Image (tube, rainbow, N blue to C red):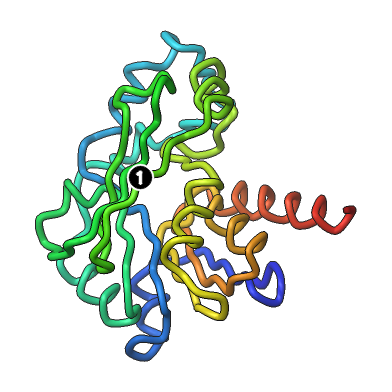
């Protein structure tokens, strides 16, 4: 679906999407694949203990689908590196089948998360840290059900990645769109984005979120 002249999001398998593009078509891939740590089960175990409401849209049905039971295979990472010149891969410390030297740290602080930070590996040989704002951490701690996806990341985190790793005119790829935070960041910063989400419910929720943001921006 063409959201704007620069934002294209499809509901399909990421391997099918990447197969349509030639080598090095995208300047930067920023992706957040499953980490293979059974977070779906973890979040289901927490349900009812921290205010998660069944049917509220946060963790929906993933605890029944084992979406986080394993990491992407070698073919996925090979294809990702074929179609993109550089990559930022969240959960990089869980993936032993990629050889990237750079690191991005998302420091969550007092966010109420089961861990204080997450790490991405990047093909750009740098070390950078994004610190979640105190306001975002406070909101996340009090009301985790405001999320539309279990591994939703802040828009500001993607803006940080774009500001530090992308240049104007770059083409961006996201193979696991999730909540659509990256699309909002790309829209605000004027980047061209191609992304996909396999799950139709999260795809529709993400599209709705992105369209609402674009509409609100047009009012100002």
| Quadrant showing the N terminus | bottom right
In the shown orientation, is residue 169 left or right of residue 21?
right
Residue at the image position 62 percent from the left and 55 percent from the top: 184
* Residue situated furthest left in the rendering: 96
In the shown orientation, is residue 123 left or right of residue 7?
left
Q: Look at mark 1 in the image and give the residue it sits on.
A: 129
Q: Position of residue 68 (x, y in %)?
A: 27, 42
Residue at the image position 36 percent from the left and 53 percent from the top: 32
- Which element is circle 1 on? strand
Q: Position of residue 162 (x, y in %)?
A: 49, 62
Q: Position of residue 112 (x, y in %)?
A: 41, 18
Residue at the image position 50 percent from the left and 66 percent from the top: 195
Pick the residue in front: 144 or 85. Answer: 85
- Reply above or below: 164 against 49: below
Q: Position of residue 133 (x, y in %)?
A: 52, 32
Binning the other alpha carbons within 10 Å of mark 1 as few (below 14), some (14 to 19) or many (20 upward) gives some
* Residue situated furthest right in the rendering: 219
Number of marks drawn: 1
Pick the residue in front: 63 or 210. Answer: 210
In the shown orientation, is residue 125 left or right of residue 213?
left
Residue at the image position 80 percent from the left and 54 percent from the top: 217
């Amino acid at each position: 679906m063409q959201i704007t002249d620069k934002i294209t999001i499809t509901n399909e398998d990421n391997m099918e999407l990447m197969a349509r593009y030639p080598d090095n078509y995208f300047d930067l891939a920023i992706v957040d694949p499953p980490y293979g740590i059974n977070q779906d089960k973890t979040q289901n175990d927490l349900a009812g203990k921290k205010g998660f409401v069944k049917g509220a849209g946060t963790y929906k049905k993933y605890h029944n689908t084992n979406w986080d039971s394993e990491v992407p295979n070698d073919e996925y990472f090979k294809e990702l590196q074929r179609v993109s010149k550089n990559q930022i891969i969240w959960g990089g410390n869980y993936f032993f089948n990629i050889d990237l030297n750079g690191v991005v740290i998302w420091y969550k602080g007092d966010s109420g998360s089961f861990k204080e930070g997450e790490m991405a590996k990047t093909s750009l040989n740098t070390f950078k840290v994004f610190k979640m704002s105190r306001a975002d951490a406070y909101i996340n701690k009090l009301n985790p059900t405001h999320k539309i996806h279990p591994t939703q990341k802040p828009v500001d985190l993607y803006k940080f990645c774009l500001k530090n790793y992308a240049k104007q005119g770059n083409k961006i790829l996201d193979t696991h769109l999730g909540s659509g935070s990256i699309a909002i960041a790309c829209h605000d910063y004027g980047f061209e984005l191609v992304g996909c989400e396999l799950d139709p419910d999260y795809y529709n929720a993400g599209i709705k979120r992105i369209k609402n943001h674009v509409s609100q921006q047009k009012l100002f």
